Image (cartoon, grey):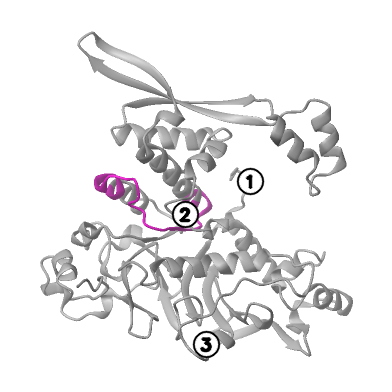
Amino acid sequence: MNVANISTFQLMAMIQELTIKNFLSFKEATTFSFEATNDKTLEDYQVVQIGSTRLLRFALVYGANASGKSNLLAAFEFLHSFWFSKKHAKDEAIGAQPFMLDQTTPNEPSSFELVFFVGDVKYKYEVVLDNKLVYSERLSYYKTTQPTLLLNRTLDNGVSVVKLQANLKVSKAALEELSLKCLPNMSFFAAKEMVNVAIPFVDEVLDWMEIIDLMCVVRPETDVFSLAAKSVSDDNLLKDFLLRFMQHSDFNITEIIVKREKGPLSDEMFKNLLHDKRLSDGAKQMLLDGWAPSRINVNFKHEVITARGKETYFLPSNVQSAGTRRGFGIETEIYHACVLESFLTIDEIESSLHPELVEFILTRFLQKEGRSQLLITTHYDPLLDEVDDMFRKDMVWFTEKGEDGATKLYSLADFKGLNKISSFRKFYRNGRFGALPNIG
């Protein structure tokens, strides 16, 4: 990702809260919030004040397996995918999955409410949908303490009806085109990208939505190293950032060497591309003329001390450990989030990483200034003993699955008497905060 041309205005954005209802394991309306409590602990770097609202830059979620931690991240990811998924037919599925462990919820729509800031302007986005239809989509902004409706998209006899605030001064012809493009199974914002019309406030929100492609979840199985290799080949600042991380992480790596090389296609890949209907005739002709895609090779310079003295070896990325590759990739994602002042989610951050490396990665992020936000899930409970030293109490969340199979989400800050606890980890291990597997 090349982030050099992103404007300062576009970067000034933060998420306040997300409310989810009837989506995956969230049966009832459930709210996750980045809004800070009145606690002043670690205020300088970890709390950003926008007007009268104080927002956190970081949150982590604990809970048993299958308790809904990953589903919280999936809700953010679903919204971003929905905003930009252009449909070509009215019968294409939206991808919304309701709570299934109930007799009524599978036949009811899901709903989402996202409150966020772009610049110093507060917005609220609301959508109600199922896997086939969008029933309602609204965007409001807060000119005062009360929201002002900018967009009101409804469904009338299976047809989308788009209404915009009169002060936005969108022509009748443009409004009709927006309604026509806005199929009943796609977002207004996907339709807006297909219509050449300027809409104040809405365009600023759309710019922010496009930047936060980081709402795609980084999962344990995500090949973050390959994504990082593509980025580092075009970004020397990123390369320097990663080299400092590698050096401080005791990987014995003193240099990162990145090369773009053209490699021949295999006969099977060449044949498949020629028969791929999605590939244009021009692209196929380029293949026939001998064009070959470039690939990125990343090598690492290692310095070791032996009986012979200091020795240097250059090793390719494919012989590096899983932890080295994942640390390289996660730091790249965090770098992008910090540069774009955007939002990043990482599921099970400790996967393939040593616990001290996890703490080092989080400390590096938390010491940054700006409006970037990081939401992670983890099973690594020693982090709980870093509360008030590394991060704040209101940054810790828990998920617990009830007897009905639905996820309950709650914050450490909801508990009373926290100042009397000497070890939050022990309290958690003893079941005092819930969110533990029920074994035996």
Which residue lies at the image location 20% right of the left edge and 11% below the top edge? Answer: 307
What residue range appears in magenta?
337-359
Give the camera-side residue of 433 and 417.
433
Check disc 3: other Cα within 10 Å, few if <14, some if 14-19, many if 20+. some
Quarter of the figure that contains the N terminus = top right
Q: Earlier in the sequence, mark 3 or mark 2?
A: 3
Give the camera-side residue of 29 and 178.
29
Which residue sits furthest right?
Answer: 173
Above or below 183: residue 14 = above
Type of amino acid at the residue the image marks with label 2: Val
Percent coordinates x, y for residue 295 in the rendering = 61, 30
Tell us which disc is closer to us: 1 or 2: 2
Q: Element at badge 1? A: loop
Asked whether the residues under the numbered discs 3 and 2 touch, taking CB atoms below 8 Å apart as contact, a structural biologist would say no
Percent coordinates x, y for residue 184 in the rendering = 74, 79
Which residue lies at the image location 47% right of the left edge and 51% below the top edge? Answer: 338
The CA distance from mark 3 to mark 1 is: 45 Å
Quadrant assignment, res 379: bottom left
Residue under numbered circle 3: 105
Which residue sits furthest top?
Answer: 308
Quadrant assignment, res 329: top left
Residue under numbered circle 1: 5
Residue under numbered circle 2: 218
Q: Earlier in the sequence, mark 1 or mark 2?
A: 1
Q: Is residue 11 left or right of residue 195?
A: left
The CA distance from mark 3 to mark 2 is: 29 Å
